[in-house]
Image: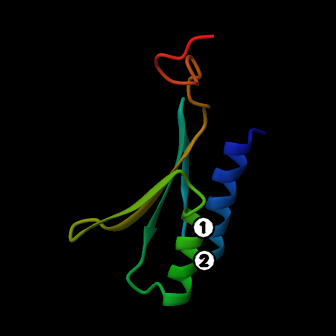
Amino acid sequence: MPASELRAEDIAARLSAVGLTPRVERHAQVTSIEAEVPESLSAESWREVLEAVAEADRFGLVANSLNGRTLWAAVHTAAPATGNVRGPGYQR
């Protein structure tokens, strides 16, 4: 299993341990993890949630009065292209 997939699974497991229900979706270049966050989440649980999503490449929280709060995290699954890794203008 690729390291990125292990990271995404670890994040999802840590969110589950806090009592959230994560949804994991795999795409070509990113694995996304989302979970609804109840209003009643304790400060200690928030700390654990933030520590878990900090392992992702990107994360955020979408909150509105219609749908509540949705936590999301994204883990890149593909390594970036390495066409010219030394930058423009480099010559051998």
**Residue 84 x %, y %:** 55, 18
| Residue placed furthest toward the top | 92
Q: Is residue 34 visible?
A: yes
Crowding near the residue tagged with mark 2, few <14, some 14–19, many ≥20 C-alpha atoms within 10 Å: some
- Identify the disc placed on residue 52: 1
Q: Quadrant of the C terminus?
A: top right
Residue, x 69% and y 59% (percent of image)? 10
Location of residue 74 with respect to 69 vertically, above or below: above
For residue 5, side relative to residue 53 (left or right): right
From the viewer's side, name the closer residue of 9 and 21.
9
Residue that mark 2 sits on: 18
Q: Secondary structure at mark 1?
A: helix
From the viewer's side, name the closer residue of 64 and 74.
74
Location of residue 91 with respect to 3 vertically, above or below: above
Q: Quadrant of the N terminus?
A: top right
Q: Secondary structure at mark 2?
A: helix
Location of residue 76 with respect to 40 vertically, above or below: above
**Residue 33 x %, y %:** 52, 53
Residue, x 55% and y 88% (percent of image)? 44
* Mark with earlier residue (1, 2): 2
From the viewer's side, name the closer residue of 84 and 30.
84
From the viewer's side, name the closer residue of 15 and 54.
54
Mark 1–mark 2 Cα distance, whole angstroms, equals 10 Å
**Residue 56 x %, y %:** 56, 55
Marks 1, 2: nearer the viewer? 1
Question: Which amino acid, by three-letter code, is at mark 2?
Answer: Val
Quadrant of residue 36 in the image? bottom left
Please say if the residues under marks 1 and 2 sit with CB atoms less than 8 Å apart.
yes
Crowding near the residue tagged with mark 1, few <14, some 14–19, many ≥20 C-alpha atoms within 10 Å: some
Q: Is residue 19 visible?
A: no
For residue 1, side relative to residue 92 (left or right): right
